[in-house]
Amino acid sequence: MLDPTKTHVVHEWKHGRPLIACSFDPQGRYLLTSSEDYTLQRWSMETGQAVAWEAHDSWVMDLACLPDGEMFLSAGCDDRVILWPNTGETPAPIREIEAHKGWVRSVDASPDGTLFATGGNDHLVKIWSVADGTNVHELSGHESHVYSVKFHPTGTWLLSGDLSGKVHQWEVASGKLVRTFDAADLHSYNKGQQVHYGGVRDIAISPDQKQLACCGLHKATNPLGAINEPLTVLFDWETGEKQRVQPTDGVRGVAWKVEYLASGEILTASGGSGGAWLMFGKPDGEKTWHKVKLKNTLRDMCLHADGLQVATAHHDGYVRISRLAADG
């Protein structure tokens, strides 16, 4: 049974070079990760053994599996998105797409597996056909780097979050911009350093589809010195109104990833100058109610299909699997 207070690391698997992104396949057989050495890794959840292969010409910032688990997508800083098979001793690209002018920061697959979406440093969001790689929609409306894209569970909507703290809701069929959620709490501008900082690093929809969560950072008193704290912002889905911000006491870093657990509770992962943390909040909570410290700073987090295992990708080259319950 899920019990966040019993969270503990059950596996530590070493790649050796700093890891960046991670994603479970929907069937829970494999964990996919990316590394600063430009390789991808496919870890067997049964054995902990990894297959690694050269992938992009730069860092891979995000990974997304298709719903059937047979293929996955990698989004790179080399402007490309690559579609891969999730099988084979050394996977070979199925299709490569020059997706954006500049970094491709985020990728997500639609619930029916027919489409995928990307967001990039060119301020654009794009929707693509999985079948042939054609561009279905090019969505303009962001005025800063797009950090996150997320399909709504119904497949009707696509959400995209940017550096300035705006989350746009698009209609997938038409490409029409429907509304914008204001997550400006996640954006900072430092006049002395003359930098915009923060942004919507990830987006999640609650299991009952009544709440939207997005995460990033606040209290950025010294952005270039990495002095900031993680923050989650919660919205009412029906009205689009902000319900609350959810900070975590005593943690420095960036909230890189947010997920809803089956219970409706919110799991946020933070990494930065304060180390690595898993933070648990309730949908109506004014702050997170429990936090778990992990080794070394983390850069990404993903939730296993069983809802009990969480993977985190770390700068020390390890992927760590934590269990959100007591053993047995």
Image (cartoon, rainbow, N blue to C red):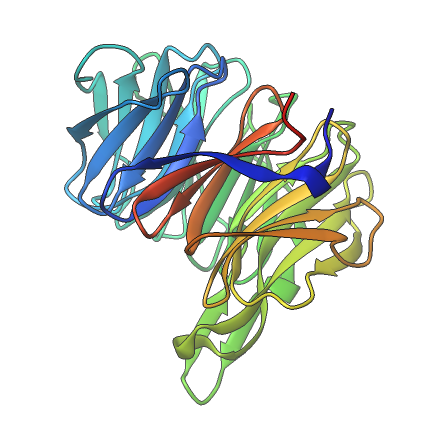
Can you give x and y, in whole percent of width and height, for residue 208 in the image? 78, 27
Can you give x and y, in whole percent of width and height, for residue 62 in the image? 38, 39
The one nearer the camera, 157 or 107, is 107
Q: Is residue 80 above or below residue 279?
A: above
- Left or right: 54 with respect to 24? left
Assign the N terminus to one quadrant of the image.
top right
Can you give x and y, in whole percent of width and height, for residue 45 in the image? 41, 20
Name the residue rendered at 29%, 43% in the picture.
Answer: 100
Residue furthest bottom in the image? 192
The one nearer the camera, 325 or 155, is 325
Name the residue rendered at 20%, 44% in the picture.
Answer: 78
Q: Is residue 39 above or below residue 30?
A: below
Name the residue rendered at 58%, 39% in the picture.
Answer: 8
Name the residue rendered at 30%, 20% in the picture.
Answer: 133
- Left or right: 269 with respect to 233? left
Residue 325 in view in this figure: yes
Can you tell which quarter of the image residue 44 is in? top left
- Left or right: 135 with respect to 294? left
Can you give x and y, in whole percent of width and height, for residue 299 in the image? 42, 50
The one nearer the camera, 34 or 209, is 34
